[in-house]
């Protein structure tokens, strides 16, 4: 059996690229070398490059996402394993490009990626499927607003967050009307659109959902106990939180969370890894957001949940590659072009 060429694509255009490099490394290390030739591709704002066996950079040909080595041999990839957090791998840009050139890739398609990267639109769509979320106000940059009206509608404390950003970048917890302006500036530094949400007083949980061997599978529910005011970047990536899997909830609540997480995944037509955040208040899970390229470093929640569920990282990653290979459409190997 010919080994398939798999490019683990990491990096990105946002501050999340550092997390993506760690995620990509774990996936690179975990893929089965008996089945796949595994390569690293790094996508940054100013360069796209392939790393050879000596860790030397070779430029990616953006015309067909191939790479020509020093020897003159052209490497094409049967599958791109997308591990980019934020732009352009989590908001649909990269997927749309790959679709255009006939390149297969893991995870959901460009539409689901673009939708779920937009918190406001995701929550609006899911509300039609009976999935509750916090009360919110949506603001564009330079739009007029009144602090007192915001407080009157949403109460205090409240959260200000970028509409399209990951890793809790740009989020503030606001305890008084006088803090709103500063919080808006902080959020607008990440995105031109923001959400202001009412405070949900309850337990925060993170739920991993994947399609594994043809079935929508809830990997687990992790309770988030942040040492900070909320589950911010420092809590996520610098150890300022306790993550308890499985979450300390009763069976009835666990079933509710699993059902809602599964319904959200299937309602959006999702594929691949996902991690959704919820606040459980009075026994009801309220959705905060869905991540379609969640962190996948050894310390990340999804790998922890998979381990407890009994799925090895090797099998989890291999399942993604095999699903991508089975998608319609193909491209030729070697130095030739591609075909749909």
Image (cartoon, rainbow, N blue to C red):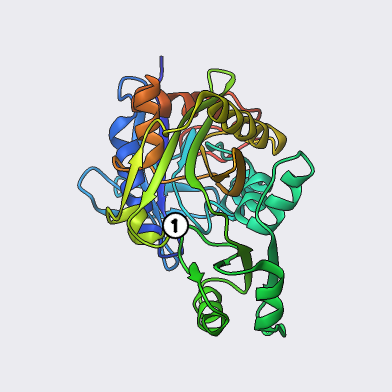
Residue 60 in view here: yes
The picture quadrant where one finds residue 223 is top left
- For residue 211, side relative to residue 311 (left or right): right
The picture quadrant where one finds residue 130 is top right
Along the viewing direction, whichever of 39 and 202 lies nearer the viewer: 202
Q: Measuring from the top left, give residue 337's x and y in whole percent.
A: 56, 41
Along the viewing direction, whichever of 71 and 264 lies nearer the viewer: 264
Residue 72 in view here: no
Residue at far right of view: 128
Whether 203 is drawn above or below 139: the answer is above
Q: Which residue is mark 1?
A: 167
What quarter of the picture does the C terminus occupy? Answer: top right
Q: Which type of secondary structure does the marked residue at label 1 adopt? A: loop
Whether 333 is drawn above or below 46: the answer is above
Whether 18 is drawn above or below 108: the answer is below
- For residue 108, side relative to residue 34 (left or right): right
The picture quadrant where one finds residue 112 is top right
Along the viewing direction, whichever of 281 and 193 lies nearer the viewer: 281
């Amino acid at each position: 059996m010919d080994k398939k060429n798999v490019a683990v694509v990491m990096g990105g255009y946002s501050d999340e690229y550092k997390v993506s490099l760690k995620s990509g490394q774990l996936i690179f290390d975990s893929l089965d070398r008996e089945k796949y030739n595994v390569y690293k591709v790094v996508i940054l704002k100013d360069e796209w490059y392939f790393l050879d066996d000596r860790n030397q950079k070779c430029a990616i040909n953006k015309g067909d996402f191939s790479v020509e080595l020093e020897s003159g041999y052209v490497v094409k990839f049967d599958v791109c394993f997308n591990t980019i957090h934020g732009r352009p791998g989590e908001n649909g840009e990269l997927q749309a490009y790959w679709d255009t050139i006939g390149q297969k890739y893991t995870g959901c398609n460009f539409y689901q990626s673009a939708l779920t990267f937009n918190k406001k639109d995701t929550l609006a769509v899911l509300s039609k499927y009976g999935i509750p979320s916090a009360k919110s106000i949506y603001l564009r940059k330079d739009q007029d607003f009144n602090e007192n009206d915001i407080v009157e509608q949403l109460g205090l404390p409240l959260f200000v967050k970028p509409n399209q950003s990951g890793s809790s970048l740009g989020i503030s917890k606001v305890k008084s009307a006088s803090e709103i302006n500063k919080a808006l500036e902080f959020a607008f530094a990440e995105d031109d659109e923001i959400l202001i949400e009412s405070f949900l007083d309850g337990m925060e949980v993170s739920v991993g959902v994947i399609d594994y061997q043809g079935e929508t599978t809830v990997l687990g529910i992790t309770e988030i106990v942040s040492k900070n005011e909320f589950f911010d970047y420092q809590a996520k990536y610098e150890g300022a939180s306790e993550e308890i899997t499985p979450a300390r909830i009763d069976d009835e609540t666990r079933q509710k969370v699993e059902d809602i997480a599964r319904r959200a995944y299937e309602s959006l037509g999702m594929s691949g890894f996902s991690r959704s955040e919820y606040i459980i208040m009075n026994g009801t899970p309220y959705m905060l957001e869905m991540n379609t390229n969640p962190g996948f470093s050894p310390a990340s929640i999804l790998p922890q949940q998979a381990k407890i569920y009994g799925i090895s990282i090797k099998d989890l990653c291999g399942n993604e590659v095999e699903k991508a290979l089975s998608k319609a459409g193909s491209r030729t190997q070697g130095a030739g072009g591609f075909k749909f």
